[in-house]
Image (spheres, rainbow, N blue to C red):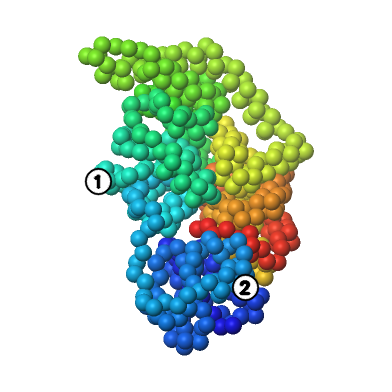
Amino acid sequence: MNIAIITACPSGVANSILAAGLLEQASKKLSWDAKIECQSTVVEPNILSQSDIEQAEVIIIAANRDVDTSRFVGKKVYQSKIQDVTTDPVAFLQTAVSQATAILEPSKPSESIESSKKIVAITACPTGVAHTFMAAEALEEEGKRRGHQIKVETRGSVGAKNQLTEQEIADADLVIIAADIEVPLDRFNGKMMYRTKTGPALKKTAEEMDKAFELASIYQHSGSSNQTSNEEKKGAYKHLMTGVSHMLPVVVAGGLIIALSFVFGIEAFKEEGTLAAALMTIGGGSAFALMIPVLAGYIAFSIADRPGLAPGLVGGMLASSTGAGFLGGIAAGFIAGYAAKFLADKVQLPQSMEALKPILIIPFVATLFTGLVMIYIVGGPVAGIMTALTDFLNNMGSDSAVLLGIILGAMMCFDLGGPVNKAAYAFGVGLLASQTYAPMAAIMAAGMVPALGMGLATFIAKNKFEKSEQEAGKASFVLGLCFISEGAIPFAAKDPMRVIPACMAGGALTGALSMLFGAKLMAPHGGLFVLLIPNAITPVLMYLVAIAAGTAVTGFGYAFLKSRSEAKQVQAEA
């Protein structure tokens, strides 16, 4: 049988390409001659010729947007959504052929079954890199697929992009906040809002959008984090990640500047008046000195909004000065935040004096309380814990180092940018303030393995992957070089029972080898591009060996575990 197939999706990226690949394989299984037109924005489309159309007995259109059918007048045509293809492509083709009907006149752009809505959204993750933008793309595609007008503002590591205007917010029927950190919400006062995280928005986009329309409630901004709505109740993890996300730019900048000082020699900064000494003053004496206060300040900010910032910053400075380190900074942030929140909720003043609360009373009382608690209660014991932890890490034997590397490496690869991954990363970053650099080296090396491994697997076992997966593998490899574990998410979402164990095995090996080789990393981000700075990573060769070994385990392991063709398991994800 001769058939012609057209696939199309709103973005012209993943869905269209995946559907085309599935239907091509299915037609071969049926021994049908199929001409396929994949309407894509990333690959060159093979447009159906007039001859292809005339010879086709049936025209099959799998699309999530309107397709011009004027060239098919008089032909038998079957139209369906792309998601109908993925369950059983062979059965889909058989159904299409049996149910196709002749087109007597070209179709006009159809109106959406559900009324078109105007949606605005914000996405934000702790590091502001992969999850932020992948979740935004997923929401945009799902919104367009349903016929809605949608605009997503991304609050990434380079600041807010595609920013929402006041008019767009005023016109919006629904606001979706997909954020793992605290984002400013005062401009959405009075709007219907649904709050979720970037993970569900990325992996369960359709389900989250359904929930958004069903569960959204009117947002009332109170000037603090005190909200009665369930959506406004944030857990400790989210507060911590808000602090970490604001701390990271300071740490990364400081770490890279410290690494630059080592270009002149490991000990060069000790000679006063030199450029190396100036760089160390900027990176270590200033940027790293701000690390813990910024962490504590923005934890408190997440809890109590702006009134919590001042006591949090002061508490963080006290954590640094008392030697309590990043653990003390975390404690200071929560103490200051909840103290400020308690005062905001419980202290009642005459209306004429209410304006003094956020600028005078709360900062003064909360700062005083936090400072006294840090000095007399928390500072000493936490400083002792930090000293013991630092001594243990600096003096541990090879067996203990390898075990720690295994644990940290496996954590980095368990959920690919999720809470476990971020916990391991925050642990390594926190130790930089106490000049403990080995765990951070193991963490970054292991964090590169999942994305690198998936890229390797698609290269060495091409026949087991769809064309679109092979392209995703190339992108994943590049992301891995940049220390962006999320590059492996498309593979983990489709085949978690094989991908996650393969990634964890490779990450654990890399972490163990990095610790065994005594690798040290001065800059907590940047992937292999940090190698461009001399002495930022030591020893370079053995560090590369550790990464290569883990990548090989993950890549070859998954290539071996993956079945030859798993078309039925393919999920149409951007």
Percent coordinates x, y for residue 565 in the rendering:
68, 66
Nearer to the camera, 539 or 187? 187
Instruction: Say which mark, if any, is on residue 25.
Output: 2
Q: SS class of the residue under badge 2?
A: helix
Nearer to the camera, 302 or 495? 495
Q: Residue at x 62, y 73 (%)?
A: 25
Determine whether 431 is above or below 83 in the image.
above
Task: Determine which residue is flagged by label 1.
Answer: 167
In the image, what residue type sits under mark 1?
Answer: Gln
| Mark 1 neighbour density, 10 Å: few (under 14) some (14–19) many (20 or more) | few
Q: Residue at x 34, y 30 (%)?
A: 220
Residue 300: image quadrant is: top left
Q: Residue at x 60, y 72 (%)?
A: 94
In the image, what residue type sits under mark 2?
Answer: Gln
Q: SS class of the residue under badge 1?
A: helix
Percent coordinates x, y for residue 285 in the rendering:
46, 33
Tell me if I can see residue 225 in this picture: yes
Nearer to the camera, 39 or 440? 39
Residue 571: image quadrant is: bottom right
Q: Earlier in the sequence, mark 2 or mark 1?
A: 2
Q: Nearer the viewer, mark 2 or mark 1?
A: 2
